[in-house]
Image: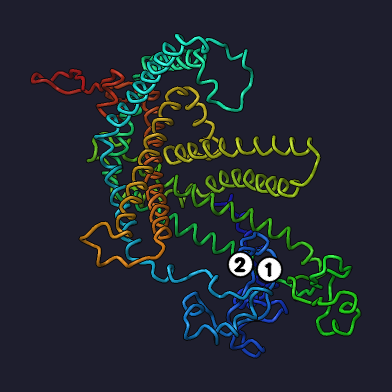
Amino acid sequence: MGGCEPFVFQKYFVFSLAWIHGDPRKVVYPTDSYGQFCGQHGTPNANKAILFYFNILHCANPAVLINLQCPTTLVRCPSDSCCFFTMTNPKYNKSYWEYYRQFCKPGFDNPRKVLSCDDLSSLSAICVNRGLVITMLVSLAFILLLRFTAGVLLWLVIFGVIAAVGYGIWHCYWEFSILKEKPDADITISNIGFQTDFRVYLQLSQTWFIFMISLAVTEVIIIVVLIFLRRRVRIAIALLKEGSKAIGYIMSTLFYPIITFLLLAICIAYWAVTAVFLASSGDAVYKVMSTDPKCQYSNITCDPETFNKTNVTKVCPGAQCTFAFYGGESIYHRYIFILQLCNLLVFLWLVNFTIALGQCTLAGAFASYYWALQKPADIPACPLFSSFGRAVRYHTGSLAFGALILSIVQFFRIILEYLDHKLKGAHNAFARFLLCCLKCCFWCLEHFIRFMNRNAYIMIAIYGKNFCTSAREAFFLLMRNVVRVAVLDKVTDFLLFLGKLLISGSMGVLAFFVFTHKIPVIQEEVPSLNYYWLPLLTVIFGSYLVAHGFFNVYAMCVDTLFLCFLVDLERNDGSAARPYFMSSTLRGILNKRNVRKREDKRGYRVRKKK
């Protein structure tokens, strides 16, 4: 736990400064162009709690979190809200339009062009929630059925690819034989040169001959790789099936992502509150806003009380002294941006620590399944809860250290993205090339560290050693089995991608039939939607997230069982003193046997192979 002290100190230091200097009113109440709060008691806008934006799309800007101000013109706070139905209703159109037209841009005189908001109000949350519940059940069933379907799915796809490539070879040969008889088709590609129309090359026999040779070489490579890696593919399939069995015995692991989600929500809430408190520190700063681009006083600081007495309005007709942001000239205000960066680093640290805690907890639960000699009899009670307790009590410092390394790399990537955004208009080709190289290097470094952290957390859950020792042992263990790692990784990624695509796609099709009233059984329960694409996309996106959460647990299970399998192969020999803990299927693939001692009828000790 001692390794977390600097982390806790930095977190509370930044939050304390934000709490002392921040003003929560600037977060609770919106501010108009004159710096006045909307809806705050004791102000002219006490009964006007709604803020009107000329262009709400301008608010989708990261600068809003820094300045707490949307970069679009705000006139005043309306006393009520309006929607498309109100503006187009002939009974209320004229009276309402006379009031709301003051909040529109000059020259806009057609209230019927206002976007409709009725579709959002008619969206049935019950239908969407039912779709997500169905997604959970389908994801669970898919994972549990992988013990029976993993091998079938994989081999079907492999032979399907071989058959598709073989058909491509035959089609290329057929096209080549037809074009070879034509007199104008024997021209080489070098003779016609570069052509923007790709169909020109398809009229040449040489093009189809090149395609045929390329596909034939690809076919040979696939077949040769399968011949030499068939045992490793079988091991990968067996581990996938074993992972499905492990989840079947420890069903509580499928619901651990809910805990991770709640912890991440707390982290996001902490970061957001600290960010807005830092951004709301200081006094209101007003600047001159003019519609004339040639105004020399634009964007300079002004005082709204004395603005009308200056000559700015004479030099720049129509200029106004409007609220810009909150700030100041003290040392604290000068370093608010640095504090925001520290807050960002702490946020990344918290998020990565939460993810690391989840990975270590799941790894400990699945490792307890693997190292049970008699499954499921030897599996300890409440393996998930016990693993979570061990991770919190003994491994917090190691998890925080691994999360810090990853957070620093991510922090530098964000800074590089910020610099790249600033240098978009620059004409220095070397600087942009160097920045692009740095971004690529840090991207590779982040993915490598993420991969190593994941395996280090598994080794921590198995042996209980510190982060550096676990990372070193995991790295060398994987390097000694690099081919098995590559095969298992690709096979797992493919099956999980296939599962996510299948589940989200099927739920999207089902939601489409539901919202378009194509299912007569539930037709009366579904509301009539003018625009069904929004709930449909919500169901598809939500289904993908739910399936992603379930399959992340399954991927962690497979990775844990794989590392345990590699350790089992290196440390055990199948004897009575050091038996193999792997399943009988894996032992059969590797031709391994467990030998145990028993007594015969005469009392002598004999050896028996299992």
Tag 1–tag 2 contact (CB < 8 Å):
yes
| Relative image position of residue 327 (x, y in whole percent) | 76, 70
Disc 2: CA contacts within 10 A as few (<14), some (14-19) or many (>=20): few
Which quadrant is the C terminus positioned in?
top left
| Relative image position of residue 235 (x, y in whole percent) | 34, 25
Rendered view: 210 above or below 564: above
Disc 1: CA contacts within 10 A as few (<14), some (14-19) or many (>=20): some
Coloration of the structure image:
rainbow
Residues 290 and 548: in front is 290
Q: Please state which amino acid type lies under the numbered disc 2.
A: Ile
Residue at the extreme left? 601
In the rendered image, is residue 278 in sight? no
What residue do we see at 32% from left, 52% from top? 135
Q: Quadrant of residue 371?
A: top left
Rendered view: 134 above or below 604: below
| Relative image position of residue 398 (x, y in whole percent) | 53, 45
Tally of numbered tags: 2
Mark toward the start of the polypeptide (1 vs 2): 2
What residue do we see at 39% from left, 15% from top? 174
Q: Quadrant of residue 11?
A: bottom right
What residue do we see at 31% from left, 19% from top? 590
The residue tagged with tag 1: helix, strand or loop?
A: loop
| Relative image position of residue 313 (x, y in whole percent) | 86, 79
As drawn, the label of residue 72 is 1
Q: Please state which amino acid type lies under the numbered disc 1.
A: Thr
Task: Please indicate whether residue 396 sits to the left or right of residue 386 in the image.
Answer: right
The residue tagged with tag 2: helix, strand or loop?
A: helix
As drawn, the label of residue 476 is none
Q: Which residue is mark 2?
A: 56
